[in-house]
Each structure stands twice: as C-alpha cells, then as structure tokens.
Image (cartoon, rainbow, N blue to C red):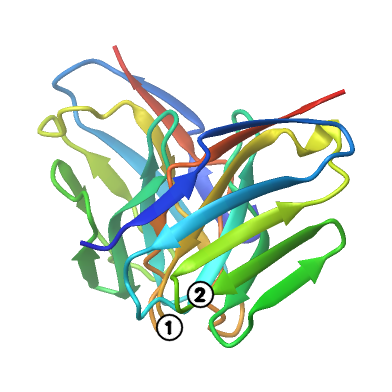
Amino acid sequence: GENVEQHPSTLSVQEGDSAVIKCTYSDSASNYFPWYKQELGKGPQLIIDIRSNVGEKKDQRIAVTLNKTAKHFSLHITETQPEDSAVYFCAASKSGTYKYIFGTGTRLKVLA
Amino acid sequence: DGGITQSPKYLFRKEGQNVTLSCEQNLNHDAMYWYRQDPGQGLRLIYYSQIVNDFQKGDIAEGYSVSREKKESFPLTVTSAQKNPTAFYLCPREGLGNTGELFFGEGSRLTVL
C-alpha cells in the first residue's frame, strides 16, 4: 500500500545549527508534499509545502526539496532556535484528494 | 480554529461505551475529514465526506461510524468495537481554492478508562 517513511525519528542539534529531516514516498502519483510542525498538546501546523512541478521551495529559515525520480523530499531548517523544538511530520497526497499519507514524525530538539 | 470547531477537547469514556465527537464548520466546504493520531505516530485517515449524505472509509474505519446529514456537520462515533480508541482525533479544514492544503485545529483527545 501507499507509504511514507520518515527519518530520523529523533534529532538533536545545537542552537544555530541546521536540521534536515528526510521522507520517502511510495506512490509515484503523489504530487503534493506538506510539512507540519506539532507542539505538545496541539494539532499539527502546516509550515511549508511543495508540489511536484517544483524542486525546491524556501520560506525564511525553512526550505523543502523534492526529488521526484528518487521519490524523496526533505525539510531543511537553518539557524535553528529553541522554539523550533517540536515534532515534524511529512505527508504526501495526490491532486484531487485530501487523503494524506503521513510519515511517523521526527522529534527535533534544539539545544541552547 | 479558522472555521472548524471540534468538541469536546477532552473526553473520557469507559470501556464498552460509544462516544460521539463533534466537528462543525462554517466555511461552506463540501469536504470534511476525520484523522486519528496515536502517540509518537503520524495521522491516519478514518473517514471522509465529499458531499452531504455521502462518506467514504479511510485507512482505519473499523470501529468508527460517521454521518453527514448537514453540510456543516460531520460527527464521528467511536463505537465499542474500536479496540484501541484512546487517541487524538482531528477534523481538519481544507485550504481555499482547492489547493490540497489541510489545516488542523486543536482536536479532541479521547481517553478510555
């Protein structure tokens, strides 16, 4: 079945360093890839997304890259800050549907 | 929550009881969804509805039921047949303009005692 694998499951970085989270999807028809940040006790918050017609997208300190051939996409956070500490989820979906397949999450800890 | 209201935020139930979670929207959206999240895991689709009086099973529909009698309401019933009902339940809203975006609110946390 459709699957999204996410790595690593936990990631600790020093404040100011970069963090990279990687996801691999199985359904080659997937063409929309959102990333969510979830803080304790809250629902996931959409932070950035990318569509299959684009290879890279950037928004201030966060960026997402997509390699359709390899079916990989990654989240990059530069100049990490303590408030970046949270669980991050990737997801994949296809046009015309809001049925997302989620990764299992990455717990990011930014150490001050 | 940007046009979607879920209630209650916290809910406790005894084993063997059915419980209904509410999801109401004032966005005039055709589609509504229910996702489940377990600790340390991603979200999984339970049910979705693309139009009034119609709904489809998601990946983990067993032990759940829904109805869509009104456009603005999509309640989820967690039945006694659901073996592991303790979880975080979310009813997201779509982004504007058929963008494919889903926006999640605060959700409902169900604990079975």
Report if the CB atoms under discs 1 and 2 are less than 8 Å apart.
yes
Compared with B67, B87 (above or below) is above
Compared with A14, B42 (above or below) is below
**Count of numbered badges drawn on the protein:** 2
Subunit that carries the residue with mark 2: A
Instruction: Tell me the quadrant of the picture where the N terminus of chain A can be found.
Output: bottom left
Q: Residue furthest front?
A: A70
Compared with A16, B29 (above or below) is below
Q: Position of residue A6 (x, y in %)?
A: 46, 48
* Amino acid type shown at disc 1: Ser
Q: Position of residue A31 (x, y in %)?
A: 46, 79
Q: Position of residue B42 (x, y in %)?
A: 43, 44
Q: Quadrant of residue B103?
A: bottom right
Q: Residue furthest bottom?
A: A53
> Is B26 or B16 nearer to us in this picture?
B16
Instruction: Tell me the quadrant of the picture where the C terminus of chain A can be found.
Output: top right
Q: Which residue is mark 1?
A: A95
Question: Mark 1 packing: few (<14 Cα in 10 Å), some, or many (20+)?
Answer: some
Q: Position of residue A103 (x, y in %)?
A: 43, 50
Secondary structure of the residue carrying numbered label 2: strand
Q: Which residue is mark 2?
A: A32
First in sequence: mark 1 vs mark 2: 2
* Amino acid type shown at disc 2: Tyr
